[in-house]
Amino acid sequence: MKIISNPEELRSEISNMRLSGKTIGFVPTMGALHDGHKSLVAKSVGENDFNVVSIFVNPTQFNNAEDLKKYPRTLERDAEMLEKIGCNLIFAPQPDDIYSKDEMNQRFEFDFGGLDEVMEGAFRPGHFNGVVQIVSKLFKLVEPDKAYFGEKDFQQLAIIHRMVRIMNMKVEIVDCPIVREQSGLAMSSRNERLTDEQRKYAAEISKVLFESRNFAPELTPGQVTDEVISKINATTGLCVEYYQIVNDTTLLPVETWSEPAVGCIAVFCGEVRLIDNIRYTMPR
Ligand code: PAF
């Protein structure tokens, strides 16, 4: 397994693979890899000849300097894990390898069709501009046949699908299910920043989300939203930033259960911001 930081070197590796007729699978990450990432890479390895993982803590998608500073960076450990599961190449550039000064300082413009106006987009202004900026750059460099993303970042995934559609990219986006810890807590690199006690509180998030599937049929989406927020806020150490039940494609709030609905949540556990989501499937 090679570790490359230079985009030109990456290009030349990729073109060699292409010349030898290999299919390319790609998993973009920000490192601090956990079992959720492992499942994405394992799927990629099972479906492609040559597998690339990028590890890049992308500064342009952070709207909070402290969060960027504290984001865990564990390249050595990540590389060991990736080698074991059959990754062929890690692309781990530095910001200077990827961005010019102008790109770092100006917001990348993209027509989100409104997908960035709710939830993560509303609470983290500019976040998705940075995500589309880096993912489109990485796709140009890696030219993958398939790219793998986790459903934990539900809104990100909806935006990546739109990006590929409107930019006519030929990559196939593979949506991969959320991987959870035994307690139900959705796996996230940010979980590393939780104390043992906070981890126990954080497990309540998924517990309440799963429970809400049981009481949802008796209530409207609005009532379920209120119930979920008040149950989670009643747990020591947790503070809900938003909970919204939205259409799984338009991300607009649903008023009734007649549409395919996903509940998306962001919760502060101390200083650590966690996200999760759950699908509601109602008999129609
Ligand atoms: O989901 C992530 O880890 C990041 O947003 C991504 C897709 C790697 C872009 O930096």
Image: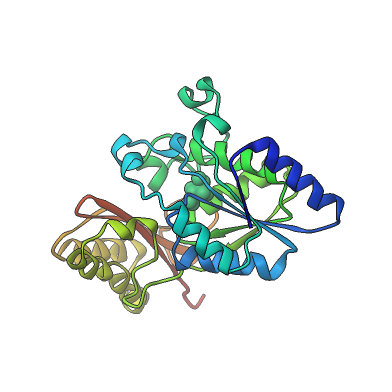
Instruction: Write down the quadrant of residue 117 in the picture.
Output: top left
Residue 250 visible in this rendered orientation of the protein: no
Q: How is the image coloured?
A: rainbow
Judge by depth and name the residue closer to the eye, 260 or 232. 232
Judge by depth and name the residue closer to the eye, 129 or 218. 129
Q: Residue 59 location in percent, x, y?
A: 44, 36
Q: Residue at x 81, y 48 (%)?
A: 16
240 sits to left or right of 141: left
Instruction: Write down the quadrant of residue 245 in the picture.
Output: bottom left
- Kindly give the residue lying farthest to the top in the view shown: 102
Instruction: Write down the quadrant of residue 98 in the picture.
Output: top right
93 sits to left or right of 70: right
Residue 8 visible in this rendered orientation of the protein: yes
Q: Is residue 180 above or below residue 262?
A: below
43 sits to left or right of 203: right
Judge by depth and name the residue closer to the eye, 38 or 80. 80
Q: Quarter holding the N terminus?
A: bottom right
Q: Residue 136 location in percent, x, y?
A: 62, 40
Q: Residue at x 38, y 57 (%)?
A: 189
Q: Residue 197 location in percent, x, y?
A: 17, 67
Judge by depth and name the residue closer to the eye, 246 or 168. 168
Q: Residue 263 location in percent, x, y?
A: 39, 62
Q: Residue at x 75, y 41 (%)?
A: 12
Q: Is residue 279 above or below residue 13?
A: below
